[in-house]
Every structure is written in C-alpha cells, then in structure tokens.
Image (tube, helix red, strand yellow):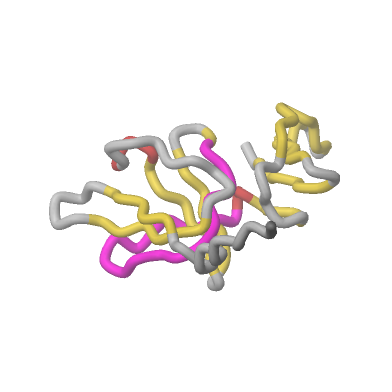
Amino acid sequence: MRKRLIVMNGHRVLQAEQESEWVNERVEKANGLAPGLYDLFDARPADRIAPTDGVLLMLEDGLVYQQTQAGLVSHELAKFAETPSFGVDGTITYSAEGRAAFQIRNTAPSPAPRKKRR
C-alpha cells in the first residue's frame, strides 16, 4: 500500500492510497516539520555503511522515515535501541552488529544569557 505524508497548517496528515484515492489515516501535530508533501512509498532503504543526516519525519509500519538531501530514506525501527522522536534533525549510524543509533544534531548555538537590568 502506498503512503504519503502531508505537512501543512501545523499538522501532519498520513494518507494511504485505496482504490486510486488518497484516504486520511491519521492527523497529528507537525512538531516543527517543514510543510510539504513526502511520498513515503518512494523512500529507499538506508545504506548501513554511510551515516545519513536529516530530519526524522515519521515512524510508521516498523520503519523510521528520514528526509535527507538525497531524498527519503527508511530505517528499520527494530534496529534502534531507543525509539527516536520525529521532527528532530540528526544523524543515523549503524554499528558493525547492524544496530542503529540516532544522534541529534545541534544546529544552533545556545543563546547567550541575558543580563538583568536594574
């Protein structure tokens, strides 16, 4: 079954194709995901040799979907020791044993503390 994710108006909508029509399966908060249309059925399996950088879009049907610069990548959820959160930017790497690990990328420096006015 083909599935896609639509992110708009602060929500993400998971849709599945049924009899040549897209049907909403669930609607949730977007959690900071960039608006857009993500065809989950086009995701390619992850390369377990090279790390993948990008935003985690969705956890669905035992897969973790990640938006990378090269497109959508899918990872097997069972390979993770801890379930990663969607909407987070980071890197997924695999150990020699085939276990997946997600490292959050710190994209912005922490703001400097503000001085109190008297």
> Toward the viewer: 52 or 103?
103
Is 55 inside the magenta-drawn segment?
A: yes
Pinpoint residue 115: horizontal percent, then vertical percent. 60, 62
- Is residue 60 left or right of 48 when viewed as pictured? right
Up-down: is 50 above or below 58?
below
Residue 44 image position (x, y, % from top left): 48, 58
Q: Position of residue 94 (x, y in %)?
A: 26, 56
Residue depicted at x 35% and y 63%: 47
Q: Dividing the image into 4 quarters, which one contains the C terminus? A: bottom right
For the point 72% across and 27% down, the residue is 25
- Residue at the farthest left position: 97
- Residue found at x 72% / y 35%: 29
The stretch in magenta equals 42-59
Judge from the rendering whether residue 79 lies leftward or rightward of residue 75; answer left or right: left
* 94 falls in the magenta region: no
Where does the N terminus fall, quadrant-wise? top right
The single residue placed furthest to the top in the displayed view is: 25
| 10 horizontally vs 106: left or right | right
Q: Where is residue 58, by image quadrant?
A: top right
